[in-house]
Image: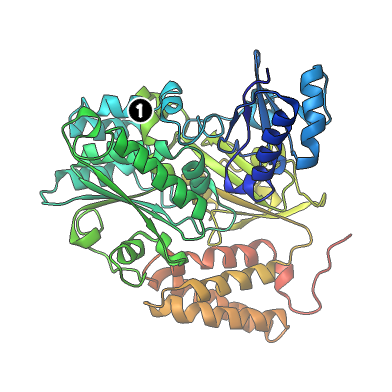
């Protein structure tokens, strides 16, 4: 009899034929008269190996990848004969990319069927919620405060302060809103968790509700994530049927209703107040502050707004205690973060590590360097509004304060790699162009500054009055940083100024620098 075979149902795996591979495995087993149970798990995050097929053995799961339909028949021959196969990667847990990670938030991702509640519990799920259900709200908030958990959406604001603010306010209605509008280039951790372990996010939101007195919650998911939306809806239905959502959450005597909302595809809705406007059925436009959402958020009521990774980190904090979580990391950056490797990188994928890991470790040790084989020239950290860092800064630790001191930011943990063929003047232009397209248009510095910035960089690239136009770009950046209503315009200067600072040779106008082949 053949053992259980795991084939990912993650969107990244589906995009390279995981469904076809799963179907081929079932057909081949039927043809051979062999009993096989195919389990659709989440992704392990090693995207260059997808579809990654795992076979359960007495010594643990063994991985093969990347597997195509044509590989299935010879793989069966190898399994039944007990021989090796060219795609054999060995025990999954021993693959170096995975072995040295510290998976707390993503502990179950790629391990279980995302919608199997029994498997979720068997692997530690619900332990945090069950403990929280026996605690007073202030005790839950104190545990999160002790953990040092900061918002994983980019700003790094202490999560417990938001919870404490909402919890202490008297109101007939309070909300927990999860911002899953993951729009930064090179990021996919939110999607991967929602598709691979949705119960972790739901558990975190329910714990937040118990801590604050909220009775209703929303997960705002970008429309480009249809698989995540479907999985989250199915997960909510399972929790409702199990009595974990509804009038009596986990025997706490408290009610909590959870609703999944599809976003309309606007990058600006990654900003919390713009997301709230969209949830209310309005155009996604940034609100002026104060008041902050914790005081007057959704429908004017006290609202906790956290992102997927923030809320997904909560269950293990309640299950094992704030001190356990705080033991990971450095300085004021505690716990772990899911770093996402993308761009020109050989081994793109998700790496969950404690804060303090260096950029070099992530890009060279985990990522394997560039996919092109050429030298690294620039790395953008923190999404399209993050700084470009040169190779001289590869040993920077991934820490909120350390990166801020270097004029950069952790952001959502996205890391995009560029080799020595990149033109950094064009990357600076892209930053302005991106802002011009995605701006909500409410404030002048962002709406107009981005357009004028793009036009001015075009003149620099063309070699027109380079010195004068560089001075104009500096002035525009100062205005956008100081005068923009939100981070959309306020952070756009970061990639522009870092590109000019570290690669001035690319801003001298035509003729352009030509990278050595």
Marks counted in the figure total: 1
The answer to whether one can see residue 409 in this image is no
Depth order, front residue of 348/364? 348
Q: Quick one: 5 or 330, which is closer to the camera?
A: 5
- Judging by the rendered image, the residue that carries numbered circle 1 is 126
What color scheme is it? rainbow
Q: In this view of the protein, which residue sits in the foreground, 328 or 34?
A: 34
Q: Residue furthest top?
A: 58
On screen, residue 386 versus residue 46, left or right, reads left
Whole-percent x and y of residue 255? 19, 40
Q: Residues within 10 Å of mark 1 (few under 14, many from 20)?
A: many
Residue 47 position, x and y percent, is: 66, 43
Q: In the image, is residue 91 above or below residue 453?
A: above
Q: Which quadrant of the figure contains the N terminus?
A: top right
Question: For residue 85, which quarter of the picture?
Answer: top right
Q: Quadrant of residue 247?
A: top left
Taking the view exactly as shown, the residue that stands out farthest to the bottom is 464
Location of residue 458 in the rendering, given as x and y in whole percent from the top left corner: 66, 81
Residue at 27% across, 38% down: 245
């Amino acid at each position: 009899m053949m053992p259980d075979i795991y084939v990912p149902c993650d969107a990244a795996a589906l995009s390279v034929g995981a469904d076809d591979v799963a179907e081929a495995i079932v057909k081949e087993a039927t043809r051979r008269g062999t009993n096989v149970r195919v389990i659709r798990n989440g992704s392990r995050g090693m995207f260059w190996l997808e579809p990654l097929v795992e076979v359960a053995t007495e010594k643990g799961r063994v991985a093969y990848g990347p597997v195509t339909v044509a590989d299935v028949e010879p793989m069966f021959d190898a399994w039944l004969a007990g021989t090796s196969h060219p795609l054999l990667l060995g025990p999954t847990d021993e693959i170096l990319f995975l072995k040295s990670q510290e998976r707390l938030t993503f502990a179950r991702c790629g391990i279980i069927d995302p919608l199997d509640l029994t498997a979720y519990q068997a692997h530690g799920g619900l332990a945090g919620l069950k403990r929280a259900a026996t605690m007073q709200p202030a005790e839950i908030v104190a545990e999160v405060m002790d953990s040092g958990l900061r918002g994983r959406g980019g700003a790094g604001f202490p999560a417990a302060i938001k919870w404490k603010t909402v919890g202490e306010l008297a109101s007939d209605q309070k909300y927990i809103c999860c911002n899953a509008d993951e729009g930064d280039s090179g990021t996919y951790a939110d999607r991967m968790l929602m598709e691979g372990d949705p119960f972790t996010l739901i558990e975190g939101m329910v714990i937040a509700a118990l801590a604050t007195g909220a009775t209703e919650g929303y997960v705002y998911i970008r429309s480009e994530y249809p698989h995540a939306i479907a999985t989250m809806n199915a997960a909510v239905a399972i929790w409702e049927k199990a009595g974990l959502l509804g009038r009596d959450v986990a025997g706490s005597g408290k009610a909590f209703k959870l609703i999944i909302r599809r976003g309309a595809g606007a990058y600006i809705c990654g900003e919390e107040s713009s997301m709230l406007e969209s949830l209310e059925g309005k155009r996604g436009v940034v609100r002026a502050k104060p008041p902050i959402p914790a005081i007057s958020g959704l429908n004017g009521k006290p609202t906790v707004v956290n992102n997927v990774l923030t809320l997904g980190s909560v269950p293990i904090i309640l299950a094992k205690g704030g001190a356990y979580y705080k033991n990971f990391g450095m300085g004021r950056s505690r716990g772990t973060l899911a770093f996402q490797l993308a761009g020109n990188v050989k081994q793109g994928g998700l790496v969950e590590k404690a804060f303090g890991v260096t950029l070099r470790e992530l890009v060279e040790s985990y990522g394997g360097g560039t996919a092109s084989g050429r030298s690294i020239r620039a790395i953008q950290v923190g999404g399209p509004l993050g700084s470009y860092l040169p190779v001289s800064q590869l040993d920077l630790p991934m820490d909120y304060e350390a990166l801020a001191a270097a004029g950069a930011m952790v952001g959502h943990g996205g890391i995009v790699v560029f080799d020595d063929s990149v033109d950094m003047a064009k990357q600076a232009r892209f930053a302005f162009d991106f802002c011009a397209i995605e701006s909500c248009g409410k404030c002048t510095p962002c709406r107009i500054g981005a357009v004028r910035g793009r036009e001015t960089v075009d003149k620099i690239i063309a070699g027109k009055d380079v010195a004068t136009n560089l001075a104009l770009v500096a002035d525009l950046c100062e205005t956008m940083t100081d005068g923009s209503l939100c981070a959309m315009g306020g952070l756009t200067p970061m990639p522009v100024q870092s590109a000019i600072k570290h690669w001035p040779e690319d801003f001298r106008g035509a003729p352009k620098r030509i990278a050595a082949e």
